[in-house]
């Protein structure tokens, strides 16, 4: 040991202010080969973008820009699948937290929360959502769907009766506050599987009602699966099964419906490469004339009007905003009824394109004059 003026200096390790498990997490991050993961992530992200650009038959000339978006694209794809899996298995994980804090073993069956009770609590949460939709339609003076009118009170009654049964049942050793919190959480998180499955609605190339019925059927299956997995599997196994189900739903199911570009287009929308709805684009006069000329060549009955000033408004869907040239899609009304062309795609210079989003403030209170047609 070093000596100073004949005295030994004892070097003691510095005690960390972080808990031991946090220090282990930082040590694990230090051992991760970040450079290799970045290269692999860039490659897989570029492959996803390539599949999307191939589906729209357009590839940007600036390949370096596409490469720079690779890691963000893969991170977004993994995030979508992980969050969808957590939402899909949300009620089961909430129940696991109630039964036991140990996540490594299977949950013991509860005398209060049975499979039927868990299913009815989730359906009660669905009933609350349907009731909110009915109330919103009533306040906005809109006609309500018979589908929601029938199901909303039915689901509320079933969920409410199950909720009361959980509170009044004293066979469980857990306190009343724990049972109340778990019952409410299971009902609220019963909506999470629907949020995880709702992006699949455009996948069903049917009418809106038929697609919604199919989605509702998948939602009911997810609710029943949550009730079955919650009492039989640990949380980690439940999360892995949910991740596998989301992989099938988001990647394999579009292949069955012959829409292989569904998942790449969804990720491109979340990354910001693609727009998911028509937007108001302000373009220079030369770009407006280019769009008008393309619409005339396609036989459109209505062509965008280009004023003499510098900026003109065009309503279009942005399919790609990567690079100097954007790919947009415009609705076309043609003279010939037999023609199948109703959407026109063309590239425009993206340097001077400005996107304008108009937000209209909606008042919560509804004027009585707007709802005068109720009594007619």
Image (spheres, grey):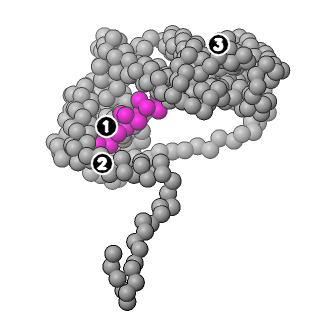
User: Which residue is label 3 attached to?
Assistant: 115
Between disc 2 and disc 1, whose residue precedes? 2
Is residue 247 shown above or below 368? Answer: above
* Horizontal side of residue 231 vs 285, given as left or right: right
Magenta stretch mostly in which secondary structure? Answer: helix
Which residue is located at x 29 percent, y 46 percent? 32
The image shows residue 290 at horizontal and vertical percentages of: 24, 40
Between disc 3 and disc 2, whose residue precedes? 2
Q: CA distance from mark 1 to mark 3?
A: 37 Å
Magenta residue span: 69-84
Q: How many marks?
A: 3
Q: Secondary structure at mark 2?
A: helix
Disc 2 crowd rating (10 Å Cα; few below 14, some 14-19, many 20+) is few
The image shows residue 295 at horizontal and vertical percentages of: 28, 30
User: Which residue is label 1 attached to?
Assistant: 74
Nearer to us: label 1 or label 3: 3
User: Which residue is label 2 attached to?
Assistant: 31
- The quadrant where residue 296 appears: top left
Q: CA distance from mark 3 to mark 2?
A: 43 Å
Which residue is located at x 30 percent, y 23 percent? 261
Q: Secondary structure at mark 1?
A: helix
Out of 242 and 137, give the one closest to the viewer.
242
Disc 1 crowd rating (10 Å Cα; few below 14, some 14-19, many 20+) is many
Q: CA distance from mark 2 to mark 1?
A: 21 Å
Which residue is located at x 25 percent, y 25 percent? 55
**Can residue 169 be seen?**
yes
Between disc 1 and disc 3, whose residue precedes? 1
- The quadrant where residue 365 appears: top right
Out of 170 and 217, give the one closest to the viewer.
170
């Amino acid at each position: 040991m070093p000596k100073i003026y004949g005295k030994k200096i004892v070097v003691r390790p510095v005690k960390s202010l972080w808990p031991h498990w946090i220090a282990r997490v930082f040590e694990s991050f230090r051992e991760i080969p970040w450079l290799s993961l970045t290269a692999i992530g860039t490659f897989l992200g570029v492959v996803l973008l390539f599949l999307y650009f191939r589906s729209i038959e357009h590839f940007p000339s600036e390949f370096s820009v596409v490469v720079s978006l690779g890691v963000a694209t893969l991170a977004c794809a993994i995030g979508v699948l992980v969050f969808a899996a957590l939402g899909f298995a949300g009620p089961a994980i909430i129940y696991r937290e109630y039964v036991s804090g140990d996540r490594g073993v299977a949950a013991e069956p509860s005398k209060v929360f049975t499979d039927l009770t868990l299913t009815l609590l989730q359906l009660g949460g669905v009933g609350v959502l349907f009731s909110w939709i009915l109330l919103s339609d009533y306040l906005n003076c809109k006609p309500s769907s018979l589908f929601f009118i029938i199901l909303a009170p039915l689901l509320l009654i079933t969920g409410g009766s199950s909720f009361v049964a959980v509170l009044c049942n004293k066979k469980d050793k857990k306190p009343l506050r724990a049972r109340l919190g778990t019952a409410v959480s299971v009902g609220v998180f019963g909506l999470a599987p629907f949020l995880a499955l709702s992006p699949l609605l455009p996948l069903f190339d049917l009418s809106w009602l038929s697609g919604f019925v199919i989605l509702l059927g998948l939602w009911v299956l997810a609710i029943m699966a949550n009730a079955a997995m919650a009492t039989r599997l640990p949380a980690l196994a439940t999360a892995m099964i949910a991740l596998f189900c989301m992989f099938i739903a988001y990647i394999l199911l579009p292949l069955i419906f012959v829409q292989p570009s569904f998942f790449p287009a969804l990720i491109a929308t979340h990354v910001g490469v693609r727009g998911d709805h028509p937007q108001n684009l302000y373009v220079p006069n030369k770009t407006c004339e280019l769009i008008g000329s393309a619409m005339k060549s396609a036989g459109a009955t209505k062509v965008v009007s280009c004023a003499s000033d510098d900026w003109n408004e065009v309503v279009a869907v942005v399919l790609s905003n990567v690079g100097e040239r954007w790919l947009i899609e415009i609705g076309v009304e043609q003279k010939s009824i037999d023609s199948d062309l109703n959407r026109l795609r063309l590239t425009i210079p993206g340097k001077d394109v400005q996107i304008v989003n108009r937000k209209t403030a909606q008042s919560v209170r509804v004027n009585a004059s707007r709802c005068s047609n109720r009594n007619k």
